[in-house]
Image (cartoon, helix red, strand yellow):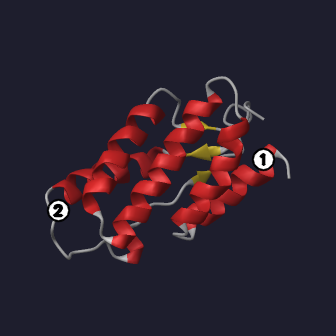
Amino acid sequence: MNFEERFREGVTHFNAREFWEAHESWEELWLAAETELEQFLQGLIQLAAAYHHVQRGTFPGAVRLFEAALRRLEAFPPRFCGIDRTETVEAARRHREWIAGRIGSVERLSEGQFPRLAPDDSPMAREVW
């Protein structure tokens, strides 16, 4: 499977709220990555892992992973590697704050509150391929 196919597989899993599977798809690419792409993939992996923790209700782990993911992803343009993650990053910031105030709570995000990565097939967004 080539990079683009595996990357899009991860996006599909993420958008289906299958965060562990997204993490696994991107991790395979991350292990083989060189250059700055390694940091981008690690940011996405951490974001997927954060939402996996949210689903499980393990909020302290989610907060730490949101912070790490957002730090890594801020170095990249919002439209990069065939996706537009603008809304996803904004949601992650909101969710990090929301969760930080609910550690120990049984409250959960509803299915409709989880973000989705938007495809972006513009030439600039796909230049990494």
Callout in the foreground (1, 2): 2
Q: Quadrant of the C terminus?
A: top right
Residue 122 higher or lower than 117, as above or below: above
Nearer the N terminus, badge 1 or badge 2?
Answer: 1
Packing grade of label 2 (10 A; few <14, some 14-19, many >=20) is: some
Can residue 59 be seen in this snapshot? yes
Q: Is residue 112 left or right of residue 34?
A: left
Tell me where residue 39 appears, x and y as whole percent: 55, 31
Furthest-top residue in this view: 35
**x, y percent for residue 20:** 54, 64
C-alpha separation, residue under disc 1 versus residue under disc 2: 37 Å
Residue at left offset 34%, top offset 76%: 110
Residue 103 occupies which quadrant of the picture?
Answer: bottom left
Q: Specify whether 79 is left or right of 62.
A: right
The answer to which of 37 and 90 lies nearer the viewer is: 37
SS class, disc 2: loop
Residue at the disc numbered 2? 103
Q: Amino acid at mark 2?
A: Ile
Indicate the quadrant where residue 31 lies. Answer: top right
The residue at which mark 1 appears reads as 4
